[in-house]
Image (cartoon, rainbow, N blue to C red):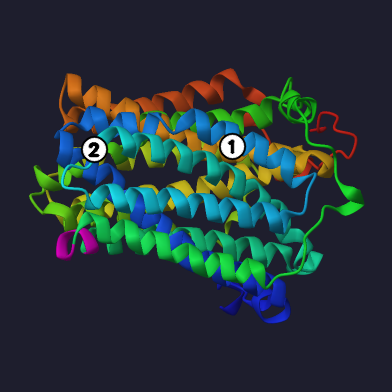
């Protein structure tokens, strides 16, 4: 049974990975506290789900731009310095949100500006962190390190929103932002203790052409395109996150604590999914399996929208989270086996832009539909649209649907993988 549990060997054997990981534990939880605090404050100030949705939308362009630039920088400069700069800048935006929340009349426009800046700085951090990990552990330990990072992400998604909801309910909105601000001190201290992390071979000069080279690689590669598009479909139509403040305070009548639990439930399900994912490596038709997982996500979200019971709502959101993490495993497998090593940094930045930008667009879509109809209609219709989109992508992109784990391998020259 031990082979089904997370392997902590990279933490034991690599002091550098241990430093990076320990700093990220605290800062990731802090960041997820702000994921609850910022939209909740916007809803309190405006009483509008449309405004909450727009808060997610305003971060899309900075997030995508920051990710693309971060991917190019990660292949060109000392990754430790880039991570330090990113942590300082993100921490500064959290400080701004904390100060604004303490004002007698907090400014909604300032929340929007700081959220956009924070998204850009996160875009700088994430591809750099992803590119740095292989240099900190041995090749044999890399899969375990990736699994540990995934577990950390899911735990922070659970702990951060739940803690944020409790802080808001028991103390204040500003206290949530202050906790997030101080959490970055741990990450900064850990990075300062680490050695430089320069790209192998001196790196590729960061430029617009290097970014374009990474994006251009997608042309004609249907399996890779499908892995990105199906995630966009799931997040745009099936992500009701912007409606959690309204649903938590109206349909479920639980206030900030209920809102925090709604934000945390998908992450809780994702943790269970990640801890019980030992079977996924035995699935050969991973393209088709991705479609099934995304349909399970959409169905769970639709069922969530149909219930007024808090326990059932949390259960359906947890099921959606489990389906999402399984989908992520399959999508990442397709990505890694469809991209040559020399382009994985920049393609990782494209991937990060997709998986983090999609939910922001989904926030806007959910908020706008809820404003025109109702939160319940927005959730249910979004889940059903997600299912329909997954079926459509499967039919229109047959090379994605038929992608097999046993028939593909990465081509070092960047040519199309052979089925």
Q: Is residue 351 above or below residue 281?
A: above
Residue 206: x, y in percent? 78, 36
Residue 90: x, y in percent? 49, 50
Q: Check if residue 328 falls in the magenta segment.
A: no
Residue 295 appears anywhere in the view: no
Residue at (66% x, 36% y) in the render: 69
Residue 199 appears anywhere in the view: yes
Residue 130: x, y in percent? 66, 53
Q: Secondary structure at mark 1?
A: helix
* The magenta segment: 167-171
In this rendering, position of residue 328 left or right of residue 334: left
Q: Which mark is residue 66?
A: 1
Q: Is residue 13 above or below residue 168?
A: below
Residue reaching furthest bottom? 12
Crowding at label 2, few (<14), some or many (≥20) Cα neighbours within 10 Å?
many
Q: Check if residue 168 falls in the magenta segment.
A: yes
Quadrant containing the C terminus in the rendered view: top right
Residue at (22% x, 63% y) in the render: 166
Residue at (55% x, 28% y) in the render: 229
Q: Is residue 285 above or below residue 182?
A: above
Q: Secondary structure at mark 2?
A: helix
Q: Earlier in the sequence, mark 1 or mark 2?
A: 1
| Nearer to me, 313 or 121 | 121
Crowding at label 1, few (<14), some or many (≥20) Cα neighbours within 10 Å?
many
| Nearer to me, 257 or 222 | 257
Please tell me in which quadrant of the rendered image residue 241 appears. Answer: top left
Quadrant containing the N terminus in the rendered view: bottom right
Residue 84: x, y in percent? 62, 57
Q: Which mark is residue 249?
A: none
In this rendering, position of residue 167 left or right of residue 235: left
Residue at (32% x, 39% y) in the render: 111
Q: Which mark is residue 243?
A: 2
């Amino acid at each position: 049974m031990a082979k089904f549990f997370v392997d902590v060997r990279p933490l034991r054997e690599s002091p550098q990975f241990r430093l990076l990981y320990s700093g990220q534990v605290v800062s990731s939880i802090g960041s997820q506290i702000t994921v609850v605090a910022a939209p909740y404050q916007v809803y309190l100030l405006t009483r509008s789900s449309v405004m909450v949705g727009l808060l997610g939308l305003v971060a899309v362009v900075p997030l995508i731009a920051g990710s693309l630039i971060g991917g190019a920088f990660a292949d060109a400069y000392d990754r430790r310095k880039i991570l330090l700069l990113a942590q300082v800048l993100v921490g500064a935006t959290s400080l701004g949100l904390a100060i604004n929340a303490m004002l007698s009349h907090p400014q909604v426009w300032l929340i929007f500006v700081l959220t956009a800046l924070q998204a850009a700085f996160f875009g700088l951090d994430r591809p750099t962190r992803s590119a740095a990990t292989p240099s900190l552990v041995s090749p044999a330990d890399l899969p375990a390190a990736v699994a540990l990072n995934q577990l950390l992400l899911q735990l922070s998604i659970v702990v951060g929103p739940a803690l944020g909801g409790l802080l808001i309910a028991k103390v204040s909105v500003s206290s949530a932002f202050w906790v997030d601000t101080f959490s970055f001190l741990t990450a900064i201290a850990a990075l300062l203790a680490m050695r430089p992390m320069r790209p192998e071979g001196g790196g590729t000069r960061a430029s617009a052409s290097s970014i374009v080279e990474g994006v251009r690689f997608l042309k004609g590669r249907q399996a890779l395109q499908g892995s990105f598009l199906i995630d966009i479909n799931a997040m745009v139509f099936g992500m009701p996150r912007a409606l959690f403040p309204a649903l938590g305070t109206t349909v479920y009548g639980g206030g900030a604590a209920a809102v925090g639990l709604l934000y945390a439930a998908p992450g809780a399900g994702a943790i269970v999914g990640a801890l019980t994912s030992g079977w996924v490596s035995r699935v050969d038709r991973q393209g088709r399996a991705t479609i099934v997982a995304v349909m399970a996500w959409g169905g769970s979200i639709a069922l969530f929208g149909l219930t007024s019971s808090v326990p059932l709502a949390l259960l359906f959101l947890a099921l959606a989270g489990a389906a999402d993490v399984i989908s992520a495993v399959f999508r990442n497998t397709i990505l890694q086996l469809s991209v040559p090593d020399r382009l994985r940094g920049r393609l990782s930045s494209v991937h990060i832009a997709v998986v983090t930008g999609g939910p922001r667009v989904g926030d806007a879509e959910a908020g706008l539909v809820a404003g025109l109809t109702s939160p319940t209609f927005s959730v249910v219709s979004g889940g059903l649209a997600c299912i329909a989109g997954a079926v459509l992508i499967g039919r229109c992109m047959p090379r994605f649907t038929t992608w097999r784990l046993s028939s593909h391998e990465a081509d070092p020259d960047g040519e199309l993988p052979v089925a």
